Amino acid sequence: MSDCPVCKRSMHFNPRYPRAVCLACGNMATDKNGRPVAFFNEGLSGGIFGRYKDDGASYESTTCFIHGLPCKASEAHMGGIVIELL
């Protein structure tokens, strides 16, 4: 177990992603202007894409912010998305 680097909640520790944020914090990701974003896998063969939560428009970056802290979304090993504090 470890603590989320943003909110300090206890969470499962993965040595592959030592700066990963918890799911609750990941759900609060925004762009630099505070507009909520979400990240998804493109398909079974890999890839990542982002969308704005309010209208579904494409978000062209993997950089996001959680409580003003810079983070980066990436593909997790074996599928899924991981967001890590930069």
Image (cartoon, helix red, strand yellow):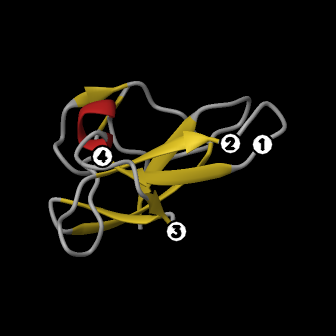
Instruction: Residue 46: give its label.
Output: 1
Instruction: Residue 60: give its label.
Output: 3
Mark 3 → mark 1, Cα distance in angstroms: 16 Å
Earlier sequence position, callout 4 versus callout 2? 2
Q: Do the residues labelled 3 and 2 touch (CB within 8 Å)?
A: no
User: Residue 40: x, y in percent?
Assistant: 54, 40
Mark 2 → mark 1, Cα distance in angstroms: 6 Å
Q: Name the residue under label 2.
A: 42
Earlier sequence position, callout 3 versus callout 4? 4
Earlier sequence position, callout 1 versus callout 4? 1
Q: How crowded is mark 3: few (under 14 residues within 10 Å), some or many (20 or more)?
A: few
Q: Is mark 4 on a helix, strand or loop?
A: loop
User: Residue 21: x, y in percent?
Assistant: 35, 44
Q: Do the residues labelled 2 and 1 touch (CB within 8 Å)?
A: yes
Q: Is mark 1 on a helix, strand or loop?
A: loop
Q: What residue type is labelled 1?
A: Gly
Left/right placement of residue 57 relative to residue 5 reads right
**Quadrant of image for the C terminus:** bottom left
Mark 3 → mark 4, Cα distance in angstroms: 13 Å
Name the quadrant containing residue 79.
Answer: top right
Q: Mark 4 points at which residue?
A: 53
